[in-house]
Image: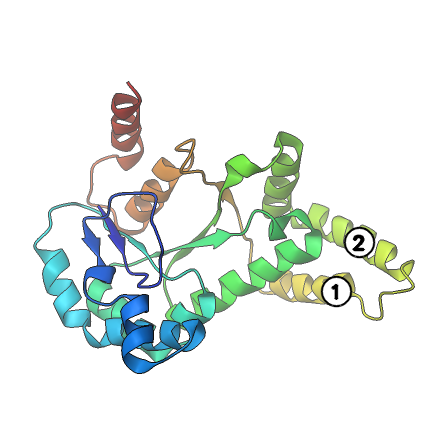
Amino acid sequence: MTINLDPGAERVHYDPEFDVRDLVSLSDVMDEYDLGPNGAQILAADLVASQAIDVFDEIEGLSGDILVIDTPGQVELFAFREASSHLVEVLGQGRACLAFLFDPMLSQTPSGFVSQMLLSSIVHFRLGLPTANFLSKADLLEPEVLDKILEWGENLDVLEAALYEESAAESMDQNSSTSRAEFAIGQLRMMQHAAIQPGLVPLSSEEEEGLADMLTFAQTIFGGMADMRDGFAGDIEHEQH
């Protein structure tokens, strides 16, 4: 089952069984409290958290083995506010895991890829949840670019070599006063020392790729469910016909 917990979403490309916008909507918050979009996003997220028990009561009445909860895309709204920890505690009931989405455009440069590795690690640290990384909107990438990004996720030595190439290119740019790539190399080595290996699964709602992997990830963490990969793949095939 799918749950939308983003009160600021203008539209969602799925039919959620529960939509938090029925309780709190960004436009209503902006009008009632005379706030701009950024301030309203923060207040709306806090208002949702304050109604966490009500949200849980609504969701508890739904049937399903797994809830896929869509949270606000702005990582600072969800990962870095205590209200979100409260939401995870109430809704997760000790059985929650996290799918962190890598941005497909930012992932195309080695330093951009490392920045998202850092974000994923920070979110994992903040929320304390089992975490898997998925490459969002993978269908937007050319096959050779996608293969390169996935290789970075599996082989950090290849990623480090790409960072050195990026650093060399930046050093030749007279308009570049700092080297993002050099900083990224240092951060990558820190993560290597901590044995952080990102791993990356391509995800595409348009091509329905990676959805079974996401459910299998949850099954692997918690167990006690039917084989979600086979079952979900069957559902997909049925819907496509």
220 left or right of 16? right
User: What residue is disc 1 on?
Assistant: 180
Residue 134 position in % (x across, y down): 47, 47
Between 36 and 101, the one nearer to me in the picture: 36
Q: Which x, y percent locates residue 94?
A: 23, 64
Q: CA distance from mark 2 to mark 1?
A: 9 Å
- SS at circle 1: helix
Looking at the image, residue 118 lies above or below residue 139: below
Type of the residue with mark 1: Arg
Seen at 69% across and 57% down, the residue is 111
**Disc nearer the start of the sequence (2/1):** 2
Q: Secondary structure at mark 2?
A: helix
For the C terminus, the quadrant is: top left
Q: Position of residue 42 (x, y in %)?
A: 38, 75
**71, 127: nearer the viewer:** 71
Q: Are marks 2 and 1 in contact (CB under 8 Å)?
A: yes
The residue identified by callout 2 is 166
Asked if residue 80 lies left or right of residue 12, the reply is right
Can residue 127 be seen from the camera position used here? Answer: yes
**Local crowd at mark 2 within 10 Å, few (<14), some, or many (≥20)?**
some
Question: Which quadrant is home to the N terminus?
Answer: top left
Residue 169, quarter of the rendered image = bottom right
Vertical placement of residue 193 versus 33, above or below: above
Q: Is residue 152 left or right of residue 222?
A: right
Please determine whether, in this image, residue 160 is positioned above or below residue 154.
Answer: below
> To which quarter of the image does residue 213 belong?
top left
Q: Residue at x 84, y 59 (%)?
A: 170
Q: Amino acid at mark 2?
A: Glu
Residue ID at (66%, 50%): 156
